[in-house]
Amino acid sequence: MENEELIPLLNTLVGKTIAKWEFESTSQWGNEYAYAGNGIYLYFTDGTTFNVSENMTGGEIVYGFEER
């Protein structure tokens, strides 16, 4: 995702309150334990979820955004 696409998405997170966070519990390699290397989910009080995870071993970061 290019900066021009990402900036408006990140701006929607300004001022939100995080209700909870958790490490992603599985990875593309089938690991069944939760740790930061799989990804991190942020859950906001308004139902918005934001996920950051590494897509490949080359260090590509993938952003996931869902607003409810």
Image (cartoon, grey):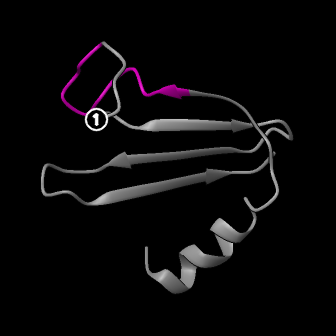
The disc labelled 1 sits on which kind of residue?
Gly
Q: State the quadrant of the C terminus.
A: top right
- Asked whether 4 or 28 is in front, the reply is 4
Q: Quadrant of the N terminus?
A: bottom left
Name of the residue lying farthest toward the bottom: 4
* Identity of the residue furthest to the left in this view: 58
Q: Which residue lies at the image location 44% right of the left edge and 80% below the top edge?
A: 2
| Label 1 SS | loop
Q: Splitting the image into 4 quarters, where does residue 38 fall?
A: top left
What residue is at 23 percent from the left and 19 percent from the top? 31
**Quadrant of residue 26 within the rendered picture:** top left
Which residue range is magenta in the image? 22-32
Question: Which residue bears the numbered disc 1?
Answer: 37
Q: Residue at x 60, y 77 (%)?
A: 7
Tell whether position 30 is magenta: yes
Q: Is residue 49 left or right of residue 14?
A: left
> Where is residue 14 shown, x and y percent of the image?
76, 62
Q: Is residue 21 above or below residue 54?
A: above
Picture coordinates of residue 24, whole percent (x, y): 43, 27
Q: Which quadrant would residue 45 be assigned to in this image? A: top right
Q: Main secondary structure of the magenta part?
A: loop
Q: Position of residue 30 (x, y in %)?
A: 23, 21
Where is residue 44 drawn, in percent x and y?
76, 39
